[in-house]
Image: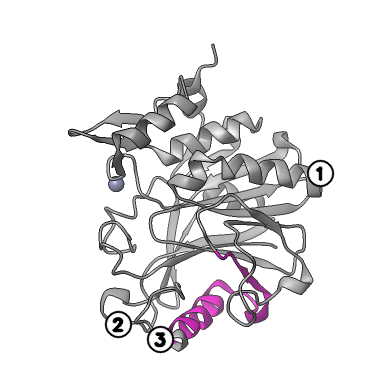
Amino acid sequence: MFDFLAAWSKLKVGYKYEIVNGIGFFTLPAFSATSLVRHGFTARCGGISKGPYSTLNLSFSRDDEPYENVLENYRLFADAADIDWDTMVMDSFEHGINIIPVGERHKGAGYLKPPLPPCDGLITNNADITLITGHADCLPIYFLDTEQLCIGLVHAGWKGTLNKICLNAIRLMQLRYNAKPTHLLAGIGPCICRNCFEVSSDLGERFALEYPGIPCVDKAKAGKAHVDLAMVTVAQCLEGCLLPENISYADVCTFEDERRLYSYRRDSGNTGGMAAYIKLA
Ligand SMILES: [Zn+2]
């Protein structure tokens, strides 16, 4: 039988954190080491937002946060990340599994132009495009094929994870850009950890049934369970034939790291959002 924990032990666990122009960035060392991409995940510092959104809120979907504030935060972010302002393409999350291949005509989607159709993942082989996904507990999943030079970025909450959005992204990168699982890197950025992610025991049971042999569900207090969405995502990467040593896991919990990260669950929805980004160098 396939030994999941043996594969799990080969993951590259950890991250680098640095501050540029007052803005904090988490990065995955395996991606940085290729010199083929620029990528990262923003912390909450260095922006202009106030109150529960302080300070680098990068979510346009918060009701009482002025659009102009978020736009200004994106300007500050793009400067610090050294991203050209008009190269970004944003996801338009709906907790589905739709992935959109994006190109020149999609530049500016979500901030300079209307949002894309509902999608929780973006892929491209265009070196002039910066993929952006928004997060506040949900998993950011990065992809890079080091030979075919194509990238992907996915936003995955429990719904997307249960419905295999990660595997969907891998398959679409193969189909559209001839990506090969053996030279595909995957990485999971900051997200809510298994101890902090409590769901109904019914939902826990659905994960347990879908992933037999993967220890991704813990029993919790009556009627509740804990699910390890990162572990399920790794299982999908392995199902997609990625090599375990090519999978990175930042292992930073958004719920626990209150100083650096927003958490939708911790703050009962009254909070800002972070951005994940990746661009071919
Ligand atoms: Zn946690």
Magenta stretch: give its range: 69-92
The residue type indicated by label 2 comes to: Lys
Find numbered disc 3 in the image and state the secondary structure of the residue it sits on.
loop
Give the alpha-carbon distance from disc 2 to disc 1, as whole Å.
Answer: 45 Å
Is 117 placed left or right of 195 in the picture?
right
Residue 151: % across, % down:
69, 54
Name the residue tied to disc 3.
66
Q: Are marks 1 and 3 in contact (CB under 8 Å)?
A: no
Q: Which quadrant is home to the C terminus?
A: bottom right
Q: Which numbered disc covers residue 50?
A: 2
Residue picked out by circle 1: 178
Residue 104 placed where, x, y %? 78, 71
Kindly report which numbered mark, 2 or 3, lies closer to the viewer in this rendering. 3
Q: Which mark is residue 165?
A: none
Q: Are marks 2 and 3 in contact (CB under 8 Å)?
A: no
Query: Relative to 166, does residue 241 appear above or below in the rendering?
Result: above
* Farthest-out residue, left: 221
Give the crowd class for mark 1: few <14, some 14-19, many >=20 residues within 10 Å.
Answer: some
Q: Position of residue 82 (x, y in %)?
A: 59, 75
Sequence-wise, the earlier of marks 1 and 3 is: 3
Q: Residues within 10 Å of mark 3 (few under 14, many from 20)?
A: few
Which quadrant would the N terminus be assigned to in this image? top right
How far apart are the alpha carbons under marks 2 and 3? Answer: 11 Å
Kindly state the secondary structure of the residue where label 1 is placed: loop
Residue 71 visible in rendering: yes
Question: In the rendered view, would you say 148 is above or below 56?
Answer: above
| Residue 75 within the segment the image draws in magenta | yes
Quarter of the image where one finds residue 103: bottom right
